[in-house]
Amino acid sequence: MNPFSFRTVPHVLMEAGVARRLGEVLAQRFAVGRVCVVTDAPLYRSGLLDAALASLKAGGWQVQVVSDVQADPPEHVVEAICAQAQSQGTDLVLGFGGGSSMDVAKLVAIRLGSDQPLQEMYGVDKVRGERLPLVLVPTTAGTGSEVTPISIVTTGATTKSGIVSRQLYGDMAILDAELTLGLPAPITAATGIDAMVHAIEAYTSKRLKNPLSDHLAVLALRLLMGNLVKVCENGQDLQARSAMLLGSMLAGQAFANAPVAAVHALAYPLGGRFHLPHGLTNALVLLPVMEFNLPAAAASYAQLAREVLPGVQGDHAAQANAFLGHLRELIAATRLPLRLRDHGVKETDIPQLAADAMLQTRLLVNNPRDVGEADAVAIYQQAY
């Protein structure tokens, strides 16, 4: 067996309704003091956090809420949030929300525990020093950010950069499926497909793929593929919501160790230029990228087919195509518009998108098949 390394957060708690006793849960692990809750304004205004915030206050925590997170947070917004959190002082950072809120919470914990400028952190293993205690609570089943060492920041008008470092792993991830019950069907679909992308790309990653990441990716796909349509059709199905939340976390653990690849590389320019949600951008390019990867990844896709499609028949090529066909049907059943033209992208935008995708070398190096700029153009054209 080849040597490998595997990391994840040291404590995961999954319990429907646990947010209602959050103050008690955190007091069992951390000294009661000042907690900075990092979230976004719509979530804060929705009242979804009210029970959790009340529990914190009842437990003696001094609570500061910073609700300025934006989707795909720009660097200046991250810096402003860090400054706001620092102005009042904090002992514990609590990221509450979707991927952007959790990503920013990680950076708040780092910036408040270190004097290193944010600009010096971009890339892999560039973070120096340690962070404040950090707890992450997802309210969507998609990004898996609660168990990854990654934060994504919008660093220019159309570009995103990643910070990847062990210090970004939280101390604790709390999974409460009740927090996802009100998620609208389009967001549920996009985030669920995002989680499936994480599992698929981890399983087929050219670098750092290992037995643990493979096992987690398979478990994640079984949960996600078995429940995605259910939660889109009935958003109040707590059992299905729980399965999606667990699947998202397992996929996050998988790709935190076996990194994602070309789907993400081609998705980022769509988010940067057209400000589309990350989960949606992954969904838009998933199948075209998988079809491009078939010559190199057919055996892996066939293995996944055997894991999630009992009774699948044929050789590797037939099984791989059966897996892609099942994915296509599953995604179509969510009724999510999945053509680039449905989301404001023009065919004349494709060459620039392809050029932007080539800058994502951190991701492209993991893809099972080499992707050139002409390949990226062809993939976008197929998605168009």
Image: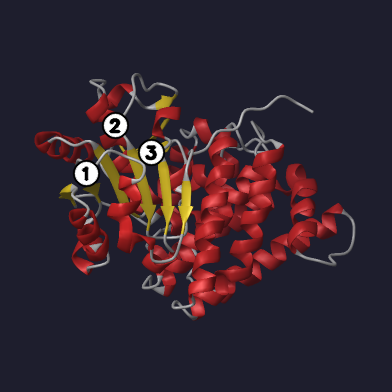
Image location of residue 193, percent across then percent down: 53, 60
Seen from this angle, which residue lies furthest bottom?
234
Badge 2 amino acid: Leu
Residue 334 in the image: above or below residue 355:
below
Seen from this angle, which residue lies furthest right?
314
Residue 53 in the image: above or below residue 90:
below
Colour mode of the rendering:
secondary structure
Q: How far apart are marks 1 and 2 (CA)?
A: 11 Å
Residue in front for this viewpoint, 11 or 350: 11
Label 3 vs 2, first from the N-terminus: 2
Question: Would you name the residue on which mark 3 appears?
Answer: 151
Q: How many marks?
A: 3
Seen from this angle, which residue lies furthest left?
87
Q: What is the number of the mark on residue 202? A: none
Residue 338 visible within the image: no
Label 1 vs 2, first from the N-terminus: 1
State left or right for residue 259 relative to residue 162.
right
Badge 1 amino acid: Val
Q: Residue at x 58, y 56 (%)?
A: 196
**Mark 3 Cα shell of 10 Å, populated few (<14), some (14-19), many (≥20):** many
Question: Would you name the residue on which mark 1 appears?
Answer: 35
Image depth: mark 3 or mark 2 in front:
2
Image depth: mark 3 or mark 1 in front:
1
Question: Would you name the residue on which mark 2 appears?
Answer: 132
Image location of residue 165, percent across then percent down: 43, 28
Q: Which residue is drawn at 51% across and 31% down?
A: 361
